[in-house]
Image: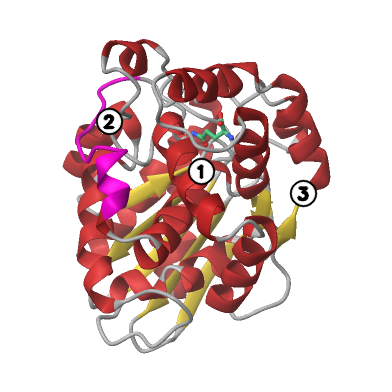
Amino acid sequence: MQQLLDDIAVRARPLAVEGKVADYIPALARVPADRFALAVRMADGSEHATGDTDMAFSIQSISKLFTLAMAMEWIGDELWERVGREPSGMRFNSLIQLETERGIPRNPFINAGAIVVTDAILARRPMLESSFRTTMRLLAGTERPQYDEEVHRSETETGDLNRAIAYVLKAYGNLREDPMVVTRAYFRACSMAMSARELARAATFLMTPDHDGPFVRGDHAPRLRALMRLCGLYDQSGEFAYRVGLPGKSGVGGGILVVQPGRYTACAWSPPLDRFGNSVAATAALELLAAELG
Ligand code: GLN
């Protein structure tokens, strides 16, 4: 297994030159472009990793997977009156679709959808900031996960498009809290910093049906995987399904998390992104991994 992961790193890592590190959140641009990690956690609990696997990076939209899991657990089906379950076919931060569809986001993994999910959780758990951190620490099995203050500040300063999305949601009656409060909480979750190894571990609940972890009921896992498969990589979800074939969730920090039910979870990280906002080398690494492991 170690040999396999090392070989994948040798082949996938150089492809990072084809991408570009996200700089619309200025603090993300300071991350060295040549970082690379690939971590795999098998169903028996064994872990295998290569590269910068213990280096924490900004999980960004991978957080949407975990906030959705929290919302499904805490809110239940009424969540789906406010957000859809269809692929968007648009950029993750598109405002156009939200306007034409009168404030109902297509799915929980685009920014508009995640902002609604955040709003729904805030109504039940106003202390989302601390409960999200606690949840991620429990899932990762370590106290290490923490918010990156610089990334949070940087996104708060530059996040006008997300604030615009929140105000459109509010105007259509699909946001209860103040848009400034909701986007602040949304930016907070996006600024969580974790390593590839920690993320692979945190996703175990999506792989193992009898998982008895902190918060996720077993019957939510197949539904979360369905949404990951259809919407997890935005308007590249079809391409990712074709190439990698596993439910996944990406973030503009360069991480991609995948799960093969009953067998393994894996997280790849390389900061340079393609034009859809997904990591070039992480996609390639997961394609090679899935081809080998099934
Ligand atoms: N925080 C980022 C944003 O809202 C998350 C986007 C992403 O990772 N795709 O723009």
Residue depicted at x 31% and y 20%: 90
Residue span colored magenta: 78-90
Q: Nearer the viewer, residue 288 or 123?
A: 123
Name which residue type carries label 1.
Answer: Asp
Residue depicted at x 44% and y 62%: 70
Mark in the foreground, 2 or 3: 2
| Residue wearing tag 3 | 148
Residue depicted at x 21% and y 59%: 223
Q: Position of residue 49 (x, y in %)?
A: 53, 69
Q: Main secondary structure of the magenta part?
A: loop
Q: Helix, strand or loop at disc 1? A: helix
Q: Is disc 3 in contact with disc 1, using a CB cutoff of under 8 Å?
A: no
Numbered badge on residue 119: 1
CA distance for labels 2 and 3: 29 Å
Answer with left or right where residue 248 lies relative to residue 137. Answer: left
| Residue wearing tag 2 | 106
Q: Helix, strand or loop at disc 2? A: loop
Q: Is mark 1 within 8 Å of ligand 1?
A: no
Q: Position of residue 9 (x, y in %)?
A: 49, 53
Mark in the foreground, 3 or 1: 1
Name which residue type carries label 3.
Answer: Asp
Asked whether residue 84 is drawn in magenta, I would say yes
223 to 24, vertically: above or below: below
Q: Could you tell which of marks 3 and 1 lies nearer the N-terminus?
A: 1
Q: Position of residue 51 (x, y in %)?
A: 60, 59
Asked whether residue 224 is drawn in magenta, I would say no
Q: Is residue 52 visible?
A: no
Q: How is the image coloured?
A: secondary structure
Q: Where is residue 222 in the image (x, y as percent from the top left)?
A: 20, 65
Residue 23 figure quarter: top right
Q: In which quarter of the image is ligand 1?
A: top right
